Image: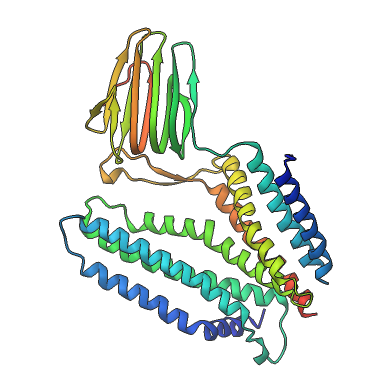
Amino acid sequence: MNFTFLNLVGYALLAVAAFLLWRGSTSLSARLVSVGFLGLILWGTLSSDGAAEDNRFRGYREDAFQISSRADCLGCSTGKREGVWFVRGTVLDGVMVLKAEQVVAYKVVWAGGGGVYLDGQPQAGGCFSRELAPQGIADLRFEGALQARLEVGPGLSCG
Amino acid sequence: MNALPTLLWLELRKSQSFVMVLAGILLLTAVGLARLTANALNTPEEEAVVLFSLAAVIGGTLLVVALFISARQDGAGLLLSVPGGLAHQVARFVYWGLLGAAFALTLALLLWAYLDRTVPGMPGLGSVLTFVFYGLGLVWLPGVAYLLLAFSYVQSYQLSRLGWLAGLAAFLGFFGLVDVLVEVGSKVAYAALPPVTISLQSLGSRLDDIRLPLEPLLLSLALAAGLVVLAGRVWDEVEA
């Protein structure tokens, strides 16, 4: 719960509304529906106070590599399948930096959108893969790429 | 439930003009699709999709407005015996659910028929219909149920003149409900049931298959049923 002045005003208004709506109808169901609606509103304000809603994947780190992201990611998911770590989104927009601790390969696949840049160079073809030496850095920029996926792991190539 | 056909017919009587307008929108879309030509800026497929989105947005807004207006008119005075609140609400739910479904299906059918001719490897009609039915169950049916509940609920505050406050609560509560649904739905998605998969491989790109989780759909449908029952109870208590 947050107790700034505006929040307190909000809670007071909700309490007044609850009182009025409980008194205002003779129907028990309608009263309960009132309670439900006000509860939903309260829940909405509380949940938006707590965790800020954003669609950002911030980063990931393991022994072989670390990745930091300042990209907006809609419909984003990450995971690891058969030794290959991936982040994929319906829309990826922004910059991701991949830093290798050991030798790793990575692959970027995308379709649609504005394109993908590696170290400032536009990439073509919807897919590319590179290998990074230890301490190597890849600077990836997604420009409104629709359906993009970044994979990091051993032995990746655009088949 | 004997009254159901009569109530459905009453709903149709009340909303005849809107049905005409919706049919007109579909007709215009069909004519527009048939007359699309290439120009310098856009491909015909893009224009078809824009036309489709426009028709969908206008039609969807009209449907909600029509539901608003029709729910305010009381046509039940013509009935000899007064059916229960649940019968009323179920009739409205069925009518508006079907009307929205018919509109969405026809529109999707028109777009598909157009794209099937022009885009090579367009997924089959079955996939498109699956997608439309999924969307209807996920969004439209609970939406209709919520509107019906909100109307009866606001009406129960007519005597105390607090309809405006109740309306406000119902309006704001909607966003909270959507939040809760998204939160819960994304937690249970893919948990237990196999998703419905729509393959996009025939489009020849690297697009992943669309995997529609069934759990949020079931959640939405259960919510819709619950809201209709609740709306029926409110109706009964308001009339009494």
The answer to whether residue A5 is visible is yes
Image location of residue A4, percent across then percent down:
72, 41
How many numbered callouts? 0
At 76% from the left and 67% from the top, the residue drawn is A30
Q: Name above or below for residue B7 compared with residue B134.
A: below
Image location of residue A54, percent across then percent down:
52, 38
The image quarter in which residue B75 lies: bottom right
The image quarter in which residue B110 lies: bottom left
Q: Name above or below for residue B223 compared with residue B33.
A: above
The image quarter in which residue B35 lies: bottom left
Q: Nearer the viewer, residue B43 or B230?
A: B43
Q: Name above or below for residue A114 compared with residue B131.
A: above
How is the structure coloured here? rainbow
At 19% from the left and 55% from the top, the residue drawn is B41
Which image quarter holds the N terminus of chain A? top right
The answer to whether residue B192 is visible is no
Q: Nearer the viewer, residue B218 or B194?
A: B218
Which image quarter holds the C terminus of chain A? top left
At 38% from the left and 69% from the top, the residue drawn is B106
Q: For the view shown, which residue lies furthest in the front direction?
A: A5
Horizontal relation, residue A43 to residue B204: left or right:
right
At 27% from the left and 40% from the top, the residue drawn is B205
Q: Nearer the viewer, residue A9 or A75?
A: A9
Image location of residue B153, percent across then percent down:
71, 69
